[in-house]
Image (spheres, rainbow, N blue to C red):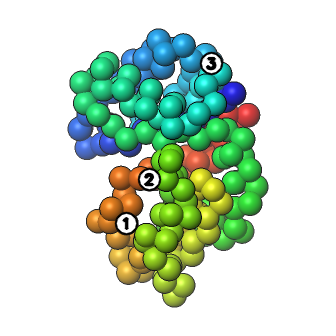
Amino acid sequence: MKYIALLRGINVGGKNPVAMSDLRTSFEALGFSNVQTYINSGNVIFDSEIVDKVALVRLCEKAIEQKFGFSVICSVIHAEELHRALKQAPSWWGVGDMKHNALFAIAPVTADEIIKEVGEAKPEYEKVLAVEPVIFWSAPLETFSRTRYSKIVRSKSYTSITIRNSNTTKKLAELSK
């Protein structure tokens, strides 16, 4: 089965530096095959026979901590889940001069649980749609700071998600075909 691991908190502002070649090697050491990385922000595409996503998350997080000496939060999504979610993405997502993000729920937490925790979007400032395990979110740059989802970094839900912009999300789907 093809998966995508989305690591949170590496190579951000010089903190927790990880070379993508070393990350690729650490995933191969776990027995994963066809491992490839995309950009320097911790996106890993790989094949595994393990079907339990929670087990994959724990395995990846433990391996990274042992190899690199710090802990990270990791989301693992089945490539087919990402493809299905993108097929159901709203027409407004990824279009126009707005900030477009995909928020990935980290198993066992669900996108619906994140939405419930964050609360209803402010329709005058942002658009939100959940397609498990992804939350599609868009907001105009000029009103970004007024959105409910811009404040997610201060909520307890923040530790249960990782965020990628629309371009990265679409590229990961393309690479995982």
Name the residue tied to disc 2.
Answer: 161
Q: Secondary structure at mark 3?
A: strand
Direction from residue 151 to residue 6 in the image, left or right: right
For the residues labelled 2 and 1, say whether their Cβ atoms are less than 8 Å apart.
yes
Label 1, residues with CA under 10 Å away: few <14, some 14-19, many ≥20: some
How far is disc 1 from disc 3 in space, using C-alphas?
34 Å
Name the residue tied to disc 3.
Answer: 34
Image height of 112 relative to 142, above or below: above
Q: Nearer the viewer, residue 83 or 94?
A: 83
For the residues labelled 1 and 3, say whether their Cβ atoms are less than 8 Å apart.
no
Q: Which amino acid, mark 1?
A: Ile
Image height of 22 relative to 39, above or below: above
How far is disc 2 from disc 1 in space, using C-alphas?
10 Å
Q: Which amino acid, mark 3?
A: Asn
Q: Secondary structure at mark 2?
A: strand
Direction from residue 177 to residue 115 in the image, left or right: left
x, y percent for residue 35: 57, 21
